[in-house]
Image: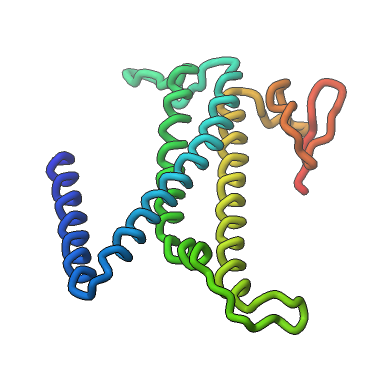
């Protein structure tokens, strides 16, 4: 069933691409279609690669310091316990990073027109009276820079959340009655919300 579904989706994508190719051919703009297609793939691949390296690097580093197996289900009766060893956590980190990076790459590839507008921008010849920049900067360049900023922020935010979750699973971060105990490996990561104590770090809400 999964194989048939994958074949059906691939056939649908090829069919839509063929229809678009024929339409662009009728108006003699097939080069535009190829350029947009190449931009989508390159943009998506670049975003996927960057996101995957950042996310997996953080998760792998956090999982590497796992002190003990993580008990998902303690079991009981006839039910077997579910325990994740370090190698299982490493595979989970790989899969989670891949899925998140794939989503980020898909979102980035959908902004292909914004990227092409930035790359092919042409000055309007009309300067802003306050700052002195050409109007094309606000139409083409500024939206692109905002897109890059939001994309990087999303990757960093996901990396921080993922690393925190991985440190909890690895036993590097634990909730104690007097605060949050942070292990040596997790302590090396800077945080403005944590203050060092004699043996532990106490983290407070910022």
Up/down of 73 relative to 164, above or below:
above
The colour scheme of the drawn protein is rainbow
Which residue occupies 58% across, 80% down? 124
Q: Is residue 143 left or right of residue 44?
A: right
Q: Quadrant of residue 127?
A: bottom right
Which residue occupies 36% across, 18% down? 80
Q: Quadrant of residue 129?
A: bottom right
Residue 3 image position (x, y, % from top left): 15, 39
Q: Judge by depth and name the residue closer to the eye, 125 or 97.
A: 125
Residue 146 image position (x, y, % from top left): 60, 62
Q: Judge by depth and name the residue closer to the eye, 185 or 117.
A: 117
Q: How many marks?
A: 0
Residue 181 image position (x, y, % from top left): 73, 28
Residue 105 image position (x, y, % from top left): 43, 49
Which residue occupies 58% across, 32% down? 58
Q: Is residue 187 left or right of residue 147?
A: right
Q: Judge by depth and name the residue closer to the eye, 127 or 81.
A: 127
Up/down of 168 relative to 69, above or below:
below
Query: Which image quarter holds the N terminus?
Result: top left
Which residue occupies 43% across, 21% down? 88
């Amino acid at each position: 069933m999964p194989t048939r579904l994958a074949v059906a989706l691939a056939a649908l994508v090829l069919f839509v691409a063929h229809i678009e190719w024929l339409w662009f051919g009728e108006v003699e703009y097939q080069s535009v279609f190829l350029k947009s297609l190449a931009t989508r793939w390159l943009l998506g691949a670049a975003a996927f690669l960057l996101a995957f390296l950042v996310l997996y690097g953080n998760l792998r580093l956090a999982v590497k310091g796992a002190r003990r197996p993580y008990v998902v289900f303690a079991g009981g009766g006839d039910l077997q316990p579910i325990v994740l060893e370090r190698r299982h956590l490493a595979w989970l980190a790989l899969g989670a990073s891949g899925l998140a990076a794939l989503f980020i790459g898909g979102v980035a590839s959908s902004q292909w027109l914004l990227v092409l507008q930035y790359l092919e921008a042409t000055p309007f010849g009309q300067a802003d009276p306050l700052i002195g920049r050409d109007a094309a900067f606000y139409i083409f360049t500024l939206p692109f820079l905002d897109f890059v900023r939001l994309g990087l922020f999303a990757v960093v935010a996901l990396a921080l959340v993922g690393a925190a979750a991985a440190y909890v699973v690895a036993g590097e971060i634990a909730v104690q009655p007097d605060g949050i105990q942070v292990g040596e490996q997790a302590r090396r990561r800077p945080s403005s919300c944590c203050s060092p104590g004699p043996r532990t770090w106490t983290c407070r809400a910022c």
